[in-house]
Amino acid sequence: MRSSHRRHTDISRSDIPRTGMTLVEIIAALTILCGAMLGLGAFGMRFAHNMTEVRQRSTALDLATDRLEDVKVAPNYVAVDGYAGTESAPNGQKGFMRRTIVTRVGGGSKDVVDYKIVTVEITAPAITVPVRKTTVIANY
């Protein structure tokens, strides 16, 4: 007597519904995921480095502005020269260097102009290009 029911061994592979993923699909998905994670990690590192530089540039601009404001309120024209020089850790900011350059233009007995150009340059480890601010002080 022959049974009309198929036995498990009689079922072909194409009759079984496919579930899950193949090994190739898993490897491809993991490769894409790893690439995305590495890219995200690199972005995070660049972002942190850039934020450090932006923070230090902002501090450097404040230090340069502070120095120029001090120069602008000098008691007299001759006192402006006293601000020239280099300082390490200005205003308690460790790692920063502030250089003040005072250049006199004219001022001789036959000159018709007499003014000083004051340039403040700030450097720090994370700043790739030094921050510079300049002002001109006329003889008063």
Image (tube, helix red, strand yellow):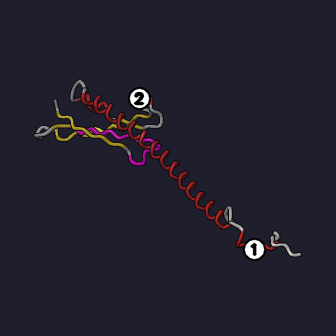
Q: Which residue is mark 2?
A: 91
Is residue 118 one of those drawn in magenta?
A: yes
Q: Residues within 10 Å of mark 2 (few under 14, many from 20)?
A: few
Left or right: where does residue 111 sit relative to residue 130? left
Q: Residue at x 26, y 28 (%)?
A: 79
Q: Residue at x 72, y 68 (%)?
A: 16
- What are the residue bounds of the magenta stretch? 117-129
Q: Which residue is mark 1?
A: 12
Residue type at tag 2: Asn
Of residue 128 and residue 43, the one placed in the foreground of this image is 43
Of residue 84 and residue 54, the one placed in the foreground of this image is 54
Is residue 124 one of those drawn in magenta?
A: yes
Extreme-top residue of the structure: 75
Of residue 58 and residue 101, the one placed in the foreground of this image is 58
Q: Residues within 10 Å of mark 1 (few under 14, many from 20)?
A: few
Q: Position of residue 94 (x, y in %)?
A: 47, 34
Q: Residue at x 25, y 26 (%)?
A: 74
Residue type at tag 1: Ser
Query: Of tags 1 and 2, which is closer to the observer?
Result: 1
Extreme-bottom residue of the structure: 2
Secondary structure at badge 1 equals: loop
Splitting the image into 4 quarters, where does residue 35 fall? Answer: bottom right
Q: Position of residue 128 (x, y in %)?
A: 42, 48
Check contact, mark 1 vs mark 2: CB within 8 A: no
The relative height of residue 23 versus residue 120 in the rendered view (above or below) is below
The relative height of residue 11 versus residue 54 in the rendered view (above or below) is below
